[in-house]
Image (tube, grey):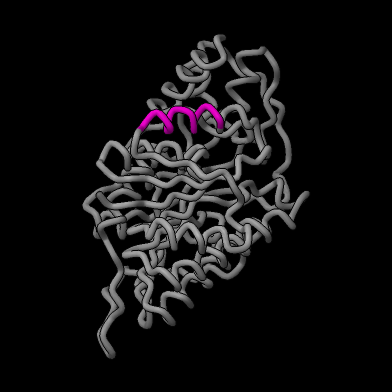
Amino acid sequence: MKTVLVTGSAGFIGYFLCTRLLADGFRVIGLDAMTDYYDVRLKERRQQMLLQHEHFKAVNDRVEAPDLLMSMFSAEKPDVVIHLAAQAGVRYSIEAPRSYLESNICGTFELLEAARAFPPEHMLLASTSSAYGANTEMPYRETDKADHQMSFYAATKKATESMAHSYAHLYDLPVTMFRFFTVYGPWGRPDMALFKFTKAILEGKPIDVYNYGDMKRDFTYVEDLVEGIRLLMEAVPVRPADGEAVPEGDSLSPVAPWRVVNIGNSASIRLTVFIEAIEAATGRKAERNLMPIQAGDVPATWADANLLQTLTGYRPKTKVQEGVAKFVDWYRDYYRV
């Protein structure tokens, strides 16, 4: 039985990923700091559900804790590592940047050092569509230059891509970075728009709609994202031989077993369409409070998912209306409203 280490295992995406890995017959070690960035009870409930499985082991600590990951790698010898743990949120990174430095930069450093000492077969590290920053050419392709991040959150995630590349080059550690695009679904984070909008609409309160509603996002349903990650586990990057050309459209490094892959729905959906899907699912109209765009936000994201399809044969496909309805059903059941 292969062992997978998942950091951020009690998080929104981590919970769905661990559930999938356990169903597929893996032993899963889940590391999570259980921070209070949002309601810890949600994380505790997710973790309790994972602990019902005999092949799941939970470690509650910070990814950046010195020597923690080194001792975990030494004891568990994970075959695959999926690094989701991070301080998330573009807006919060303006208020509390140090937490992003500690979790995202120092945490990733601790992970890379542990992997250097006890090399896994494949490491998959979460990045973000925010890494594309000020890029305006759409859809975003992994081979595009991405040098102009617009939030400290995005800057730390882009930095982890470069850090992982250096370790992949120096120590021949196979690394896949995956860039998420606005992930949503049941058990989602309370700081995300879908949760906030659903809560406000059901309570008869107005919702804050930024950039006066002229925002576009490549909304990706959480189980589609997990399917992409699961399939990418098998697509282990191989360092090209000297002089070997990298295929067009592939982000594979010419000097390391490292690549970056978008996981998105290949559709840029207006925020107003997303709100209409919530209205349809709740059966209520939203009172909209139109606001200017917030600092650090980008007006649009859109993934080119061709590389994901080339590597795995898969591309996400859940329609916003379907995914939002599943979230609203979960929300009503969980909060009994």
In this view, 98 is above or below 292:
below
Most foreground residue, 44 or 313: 44
Q: Please tell me which residue is depicted at 52% across the width and 72% down the height of the picture.
A: 162
Q: Image check: 13 left or right of 122? A: right
Asked if one can make out residue 273 in the rendered structure from this viewpoint, the answer is no
Residue farthest to the front, as pictured: 75
Determine if the magenta segment contains residue 275: no
- The rendered magenta stretch, by its main secondary structure, is classed as helix
Residue farthest to the right, as pictured: 95
Q: Which residues are magenta?
A: 44-53
Most foreground residue, 271 or 87: 87
Most foreground residue, 320 or 9: 9
Q: Position of residue 117 (x, y in %)?
A: 45, 72
Q: Position of residue 264 (x, y in %)?
A: 40, 48
Q: Please tell me which residue is depicted at 46% across the width and 75% down the height of the picture.
A: 167
Asked if one can make out residue 51 in the rendered structure from this viewpoint, the answer is yes
